[in-house]
Amino acid sequence: MSSDSQSPIQDSDEDHVADSVELGPAELIRRHQQGVWRYLRVLGCDAATADDLTQETFLRVLRRQNFVQHNDAATSSYLRRTAYNLLVSLHRKQGRVQTIVESSVLDEVWDRWAGKDLTGNFAVEALRECLSALSDRAQTALNMRFSQQATRVEIGKTLNISDHGARNLMQRAKLQLRQCVESRLNTDE
């Protein structure tokens, strides 16, 4: 978030629809780097691959003679499409048979999730706040599952519940998280 505690989502539309806003390379990278990196992570890249492809995305775009920055939303979309194409090329080079949803579908999901917040910071902060509102047991279960890749049996043993109890706890916690995050994102549009 910015220093004045105003979310990028709360900025006025005028800030995002300026005609042909030409940013220098450093400002372009500063403004869009986190968003491109997070987009690549959503596509399934590990952190190192996302780092490499983010860097390659900006190198490729900045080397283009005909690249024109119209506004933040259009630039962000163009950068995501470039990153997507680089990922598809990487998968082809590695001989992966991994299907990635078409970029237009992903862009629609990304726009719904991140909105005008080019970096996704607002959504990440909403997730953090909602996660901290869960019970300690729910936080432990989700942390074990998604950070430590623990099985339901391991989670159940740690929390002194059955593996079915662990599954139910995680399902309820994920539902609470989804509802909380959606509520926060919808109230700040």
Image (cartoon, rainbow, N blue to C red):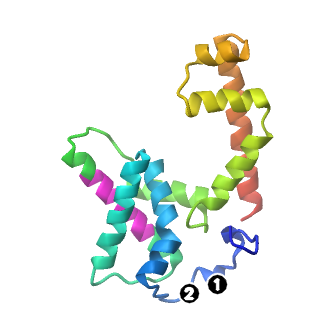
Q: Main secondary structure of the magenta part?
A: helix
Type of the residue with mark 1: Glu
| Magenta region includes residue 78 | yes
Q: Which residue is mark 2?
A: 18
Q: Which mark is residue 4?
A: none
Residue 155, by quadrant, is: top right
- Magenta region: 77-89
The mark found on residue 14 in the picture is 1
x then y, percent, for residue 134:
78, 36
Quarter the C terminus occupies: bottom right
Task: Using the image as rendered, state which of residue 82 and residue 52 is in the foreground.
Answer: 52
Q: Are marks 1 and 2 in contact (CB under 8 Å)?
A: yes
> On the picture, is 22 further left or further right than 169?
left
Judge whether residue 39 is colored magenta.
Answer: no
Is residue 138 rendered to the left or right of residue 33? right
Q: CA distance from mark 1 to mark 2?
A: 6 Å
Q: Which of the 4 image quarters holds residue 58?
A: bottom left
Query: Within 10 Å of the Cα at label 2, are there few (<14), some (14-19), or many (20+) other Cα atoms?
Result: few
| Residue at image coords 59%, 79% | 16
Q: Position of residue 47 (x, y in %)?
A: 43, 48
Q: Position of residue 185 (x, y in %)?
A: 71, 57
Q: Is residue 47 above or below residue 85?
A: above
